[in-house]
Structures are given as structure tokens and as C-alpha cells.
Amino acid sequence: MTDLLGSLSGSTGPAGPEAPQCSRRGCRASARWRLRWNNPRIHPPERRKEWLACGEHRDWLQTYLTERGLWRETLPLDGADGTGDARA
């Protein structure tokens, strides 16, 4: 007999990475940055989606989003919050 309720309470699939990883395809480096973005054609203005980036791919991912008019802000992954580009 299958425990349906028990199977819904826990993950039975493969575990994800222990530490957040870069969102760049093929990169498995630890993420250090949160690139917050939204698509104004389909998302309300206050909605934000996030990609994570390692130090090596931060600029590439930010440029990709900026060229498409999707980038909103880049913040350190450590939880510090603010507005605008946290490049400083």
C-alpha cells in the first residue's frame, strides 16, 4: 500500500545543490550575486524573478538581461538588500 500523504510531505526526487549555484548554463560555481529582473510585457511592475551569478558570469548575465530590457537590479547574495546596481 502506498503512503500518499507521506509521499506528499517530503521530497523523493534528487536533492538539489547544497549551496546556491550560478544560473549561467553549464556553470556549477557558487553564486555570489542575485540579478533581479522582470519582463514588463507579462509581469506586473512589482514582480521580480532572480538569477544567481558567480563572480565570473555576473557581467555576462547582467548584460544579457539589460540588452533585453529585463534587468532591474543586482544585489549581493549574502542577503543585503537595496536598490539599483550593487556594483560598488
Image: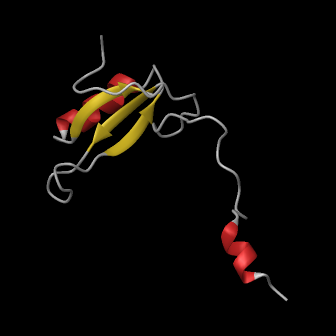
Give the image's coloring scheme. Answer: secondary structure
Is residue 7 positioned above or below 53 on the image?
Answer: below
Q: Position of residue 32 (x, y in %)?
A: 48, 24
Q: Position of residue 43 (x, y in %)?
A: 21, 56
Number of numbered discs present?
A: 0
Q: Taking 76 as reference, is 28 left or right?
A: right
Q: Taking 37 as reference, is 15 left or right?
A: right
- Residue at image position (18%, 35%) is 67
Q: Position of residue 2 (x, y in %)?
A: 80, 85
- Residue at image position (20%, 34%) is 66
- Residue at image position (54%, 33%) is 27
Q: In this orientation, which residue lies closer to the viewer: 80 or 77? A: 80
Quadrant for the N terminus, please. Answer: bottom right
Q: Taking 5 as reference, is 77 left or right?
A: left
Quadrant for the C terminus, please. Answer: top left
Q: Position of residue 18 (x, y in %)?
A: 67, 38
Is residue 13 positioned above or below 23 on the image?
Answer: below
Name the quadrant containing residue 71: top left
Q: In this orientation, which residue lies closer to the viewer: 56 or 21? A: 21
In the picture as drawn, the residue positioned furthest to the top comes out as 88
In the picture as drawn, the residue positioned furthest to the bottom comes out as 1
Q: Taking 2 as reference, is 69 left or right?
A: left
